[in-house]
Image (tube, helix red, strand yellow):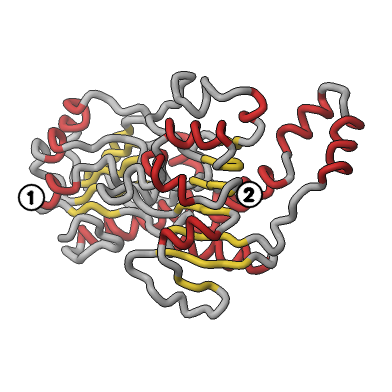
């Protein structure tokens, strides 16, 4: 079995347990090489980080290919249509990073509610008492009692709900498939109603034609004024120019984003290079690392190994995303 690995080599060596498989590995690194280099591996399986493109030009020119395994949850950079036409399975690691991403989303909520970055900067600037006096005069909000709307009630959304229940939040969710959470404390709510009534809106849906720019100038008008938006899913879910404008106007109270679009982020992104300083303190950004924890890596390699072994036995792998 020839396996092409579009992954960080150190990560693979540290967290995988594939040494005893007898498979032949082609290490291509985390930076995508020229498609011809991938094709030349003549691999049966490609395992690729979700941030790397596996296009039709690769899939259609690898007759030996049987499986493209996304080493993550996202698969929007894999040409699933070309893979389906070629009879190649595309699988992801759905649920493997659910707890990790949920924890990260909560961290961002708390950081924004408690003005963490601003207060830390004030301490480092020798203005600890000024920051403290401001908090005494104005108070800091608690997460307790906040109404949180979870958009997308898959594995991550459910993990997030379980954490936020312990904080005493009021919870609702929107999902196109799940209409009954099975939990009396987490109620389904139509999306527009969720936008208009929630103190915090947190996104946990994949990128599809329907979800691309789902948070835009029009939908932001529906948000409760001063609400917090959390996006630990994909940058493509937001019209970033519209989000920046809503932050500046105060319609949006704060933004926590683990991912922007495109990657790599640059100063040209409206949420990085053009926000006034006082608005920047209402934004928490991280470099798309919410799901990259030790436990996720171990689970993802376990999932990938299981799927490759299934392919070798002519069995169906788990978490197929291209309809085969």
Q: Is residue 111 above or below residue 270?
A: below
Of pointers 1 and 2, the one earlier in the residue sequence: 1
Regarding residue 255, the answer to whether it shows in the image is no
Numbered tag placed on residue 85 in the rendering: 1
Q: Which of the image's four quarters has the C terminus?
A: bottom left
For the residue labelled by badge 1, is the local secondary structure a helix, a strand or a loop? helix
User: Residue 167: x and y, percent?
Assistant: 69, 64
Left or right: 6, with 183 as reference point: left
Please tell me which residue is depicted at 33% across the width and 68% down the height of the picture.
Answer: 177
Please tell me which residue is depicted at 25% across the width and 59% down the height of the picture.
Answer: 320
- Residue 192 or 261: which is nearer the viewer? 192
User: Residue 297: x and y, percent?
Assistant: 48, 49
- Residue 200 or 57: which is nearer the viewer? 200
Q: Is residue 135 above or below residue 275?
A: below
Instruction: Identify the image quadrant of residue 162.
Output: bottom right
CA gap, disc 1 and disc 2: 42 Å
Left or right: 128, with 229 as reference point: right
Instruction: Identify the image quadrant of residue 216.
Output: top left
- Residue 322 or 218: which is nearer the viewer? 218
For the residue labelled by badge 2, is the local secondary structure a helix, a strand or a loop? helix
Residue of label 2: 109
């Amino acid at each position: 079995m020839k396996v092409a690995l579009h992954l960080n080599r150190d990560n693979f060596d540290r967290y995988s347990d594939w040494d005893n498989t007898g498979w032949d590995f082609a290490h291509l690194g985390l930076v995508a090489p020229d498609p011809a280099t991938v094709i030349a591996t003549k691999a049966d399986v490609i395992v690729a980080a979700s941030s790397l493109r596996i296009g039709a030009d690769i899939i259609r020119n690898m007759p030996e290919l049987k499986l493209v395994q996304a080493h993550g949850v996202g698969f929007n950079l894999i040409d699933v249509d070309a893979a389906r036409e070629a009879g190649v399975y595309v699988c992801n690691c759905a649920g493997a990073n659910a707890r990790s991403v949920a924890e990260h989303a909560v961290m961002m909520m708390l950081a924004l509610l408690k003005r963490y970055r601003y207060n830390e900067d004030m301490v480092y600037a020798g203005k600890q008492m000024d920051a403290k006096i401001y908090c005494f005069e104005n108070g800091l909000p608690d997460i307790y009692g906040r109404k949180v709307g979870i958009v997308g009630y898959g594995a991550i959304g459910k993990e997030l709900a379980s954490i936020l229940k312990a904080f005493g939040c009021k919870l609702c969710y929107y999902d196109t498939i799940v209409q009954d959470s099975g939990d009396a404390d987490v109620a389904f709510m139509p999306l527009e109603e969720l936008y208009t009534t929630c103190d915090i809106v947190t996104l946990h849906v994949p990128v599809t034609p329907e979800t691309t720019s789902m948070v835009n100038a029009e939908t932001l008008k529906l948000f409760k004024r001063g609400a917090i938006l959390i996006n630990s899913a994909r940058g493509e879910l937001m019209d970033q120019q519209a989000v920046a404008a809503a932050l500046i106007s105060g319609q949006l109270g704060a933004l926590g984003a683990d991912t922007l679009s495109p990657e790599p982020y640059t100063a040209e992104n409206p949420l990085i290079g053009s926000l006034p300083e006082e608005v920047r303190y209402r934004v928490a950004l991280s470099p798309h690392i919410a799901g990259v924890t030790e436990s996720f890596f171990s689970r993802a390699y376990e999932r990938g190994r299981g799927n490759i072994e299934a392919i070798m036995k002519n069995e169906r792998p788990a978490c197929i995303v291209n309809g085969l």
